[in-house]
Amino acid sequence: MQLVSLGRPLLALELTLNSGQAFHWLREGDGWLGAVGSEAVYLEQKDGELFVNAGAEEAAAGYLALDHPLEEIEATFPQDPVTREALEFCRGMRILRQPSWEALATFITSSMKQVAHIAQISHTLRKRYGRRLILGGREVYAYPEPAALAALAEADLRACALGYRAANLQASARLVAEGGVDLGVVAGLPDVEAQMELRRLPGVGEKVANCALLFGFERLKAFPVDVWIERVIRERYFSKKRKVTAAMIRGFCGKAFGPYGGYAQQYLFHHARLTWKKG
DNA sequence: CTCCAGGTTCCGG
DNA sequence: CCGGAACATGGA
C-alpha cells in the first residue's frame, strides 16, 4: 500500500481513535485501519509524522479535523487543576469530524454500555449491514445507512446484542430515512434548536443528543454529561456540596469550560475513565 | 456471583 | 424540578 505524508500536525492519533468517540478502528501493522464514511482508510503515525494511504488524504484530514486550531483550543481551557491534569494526559487529542448519522446512531446504541461493548456492536452492525470496502486486501465496513437499518426487523437488531436499544435504533433509522427528522436541516440549526430536533428521535435524550452534536455536527461546545463526567464534576468541583442536582451540573458545564467545552469534556472524560481510582 | 457501564423514558412527589 | 424504576447485555 502506498502511503502519503500529511506532515506533522499536533495530533495524538492513538489517543484520538481510542477515546470513545469512534469505535471501529483496528490495529493493522504499525497503524490503524477503518472507514471514513464510505471510504476505507489506513492511518499511521511515525515519529510525529502522519501517513495515510494514497488517495485518502482529503478524507483523512477532514475526519481527523486537522484544520481545528488545536493549540488555540487547548489554550481556552480553564486553568483549574482538574482540567490541567486532563490536558496534560490528553494533549493532541482531537474531536473527530464524523458523519452525522454514524455518530448519532452509534451513541443511540451506547446507553448503559461500556466502550468495549459499544465497539462490538458497531463492528457487528457494520459487518452485517454496512457496505464492504477493500483496502490493501483487507476488508473494512462502512457504518450502515439509515435506510439499511430502517428496512430491518427489530429482531434482526436484537440479534446484534443491542438489547432494548434495538427498537430505538430501528425507529430512529426509519425517521431519518423517511425524512421525519432531516439531519441536513439539523446541521443548519443553532445548537439549542438542533438538540431539540435530535431529541425527537427515540433513544435520544440530552446526553446522546450532545454526543451527536459534538461528534457528528461539529458543535464544539456541546457537553455530554455521562457517568464519568458526572463523577468528575461532583467529586472534584462540587466536593463539599451536599446536594448536586443534574441542573446544577448542566449549568456549571455549560459555563465553566469555555467556547470549546466539548473538547474539554472529551479530555476530562478520557482522563477520568483511564485513571480514576475509587475512594 | 455481584456490580456497573459515554441513558432514556415514564411516573409519582 | 427531583428521585426511582424498568429496560438487556457482557466485561470486570
Image (cartoon, coloured by chain):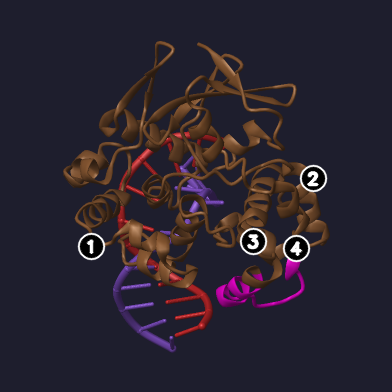
Chain colours: A brown, B purple, C red
- Chain on which label 4 sits: A
Task: Return the disc, 3 or 4, that comes first in the chain's sequence.
Answer: 4
Q: Which one is closest to the eye, mark 2 or mark 3? A: 3
Q: Is residue A136 left or right of residue A243?
A: left
Give percent across and percent down for residue A112. Answer: 45, 52
- Chain on which label 2 sits: A
Q: Amino acid at mark 4?
A: Arg
CA gap between label 2 and label 1 equals: 43 Å
Q: Amino acid at mark 2?
A: Glu
Q: Are marks 1 and 3 in contact (CB under 8 Å)?
A: no
Q: Which residue is mark 3?
A: A261
CA gap between label 3 and label 4 equals: 17 Å
CA gap between label 1 and label 4 equals: 42 Å
Task: Return the disc, 1 or 3, that comes first in the chain's sequence.
Answer: 1
- Chain on which label 3 sits: A
Q: Compared to A227, does B13 lie above or below?
A: below
Q: Which residue is mark 4?
A: A236
Can residue A279 be seen here? The reply is: no
Q: Is residue A110 left or right of residue A222?
A: left
Q: Which mark is residue A88?
A: 2
Segment tinted magenta in the rendering: A237-252
Q: Which residue is mark 1?
A: A180
- Chain on which label 1 sits: A
Task: Return the disc, 2 or 1, that comes first in the chain's sequence.
Answer: 2
Nearer to me, A79 or A229 = A79
CA gap between label 1 and label 3 equals: 30 Å
Residue at 61% from the left image edge and 62% from the top image edge: A230
